[in-house]
Amino acid sequence: MKLSTTKELFVWANKHQRAVCAFNVNNMELIQAVTTAADELGVPIILQISKGARNYAQLPYLMKLIEAAVSTIKIPVAVHLDHGDSFELCKEVLDAGFTSVMIDGSHLPFEDNIALTKKVVDYANKTGASVEGELGTIGGIEEEKSNEKSLYTDPTTVKEYVERTGVTSLAISIGTAHGAFKYTTPDPQLRFDILEQINREIPHIPLVLHGASSVTPADLDTINAHGGQIKNAIGVSESVLAKSIPLGIRKINIDSDLRLAFTAALRAHFVANPEHFDPRQYLGAARAHVSELVKHKLLAFSVLSPQVA
Ligand code: G3H
Ligand code: 13P
Ligand code: ZN
């Protein structure tokens, strides 16, 4: 299986001034949905696997599924660890063939974050894999781990961090948040002023935007109209997210929108087809719907003539 590193995909993204989408996957249907959609549009993608996804599906299964998917398509694909929380986990997935890892030391004191990240970079350099570091606290799951008051990345720290660690790319916090309940009021504004300062400090480093699900209103409506109860979920619109690309964002992380799309299709399918009990029927419907969502994201952020609503 010939996988790309994220470093290689960032060369493409820089050349075209676009972002590579990184989709979280944890089963066959998601892997197929993402890879076939990207292949149809002819743009590279990152398949990312969290510690939770690794615990759920186990690495040997995920690697074989990805190997099968990559053997049927032509576009470059990188396999990336999302939010690695220890050197040991990063080492485990690099040894299993991942071409990129994130080491998330953002909750640690600056010097400790640098030391942990550098240790991972030194190991990754042996296989040529890429490493994503993080500075700042992205909302949603990271605040409780952090003692810092400010959620945003401090632009005065980024140059020293990337120079001393040697990371390939840097995840930053400018106001996005993980999950489906990102904000309490609609129409959130991101701190593009901070992003601009960061990009000025480290113009050669690809920047990564986590928490980039838009929490697709149509999928939420479908879920709630078919027995679901997901109330007050709010994301960031794709038109706001797209403004980050000219300011140096080269990787856009999306997980929650895939979960919502999968769930919406399943709920609608079961209500429309109460007699169905063959998993291929309802999982096939979910896979097709996720694939449409992925195409929509790629059209907004990755294809060379963006189509943002
Ligand atoms: O940023 C977190 C990702 O959405 C992964 O979530 O840890 O539930 O797999 P997870
Ligand atoms: P969302 O929860 O907004 O999809 O963010 C996913 C993410 O950042 C994965 O690292
Ligand atoms: Zn994240």
Image: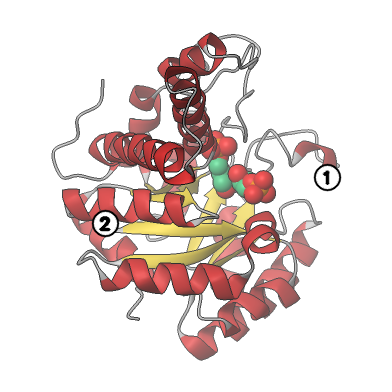
Q: Quadrant of the N terminus?
A: bottom left
The colour scheme used here is secondary structure
**Can see residue 231?**
yes
Kind of residue at badge 2: Asn
- Residue 286 is situated, as x and y percent measured from the top left of the image, at 42, 37
- Residue 255 is situated, as x and y percent measured from the top left of the image, at 52, 42
Kind of residue at badge 1: Lys
Using the image, determine if residue 230 lies above or below residue 55: above
Crowd rating for badge 2 (residues with CA inside 10 Å; few <14, some 14–19, many 20+): some
> Which callout, 2 or 1, points at the residue further toward the start of the chain?
2
Q: Residue at x 53, y 14 (%)?
A: 226
Identity of the residue furthest to the left in this view: 305
Q: Which mark is residue 14?
A: 2
Find the distance from the CA under tag 2 to the CA under tag 1.
Answer: 33 Å
- Residue 209 is situated, as x and y percent measured from the top left of the image, at 49, 43
Q: Is residue 200 left or right of residue 304?
A: right
Identity of the residue furthest to the front in this view: 275
Q: Residue at x 32, y 80 (%)?
A: 2
SS label for mark 2 = helix
SS label for mark 1 = helix
User: Mark 2, mark 1: which one is toward the viewer?
Assistant: 1
Q: Which mark is residue 145?
A: 1
Crowd rating for badge 1 (residues with CA inside 10 Å; few <14, some 14–19, many 20+): few
Q: Residue at x 33, y 39 (%)?
A: 288
Using the image, determine if residue 222 lies above or below residue 133: above
Q: Nearer the viewer, residue 278 or 282?
A: 278
Q: Nearer the viewer, residue 31 or 165?
A: 31
Q: Which mark is residue 169?
A: none
Q: Quadrant of the C terminus?
A: top left
Q: Residue at x 48, y 12 (%)?
A: 221
Q: Quadrant of ligand 2?
A: top right
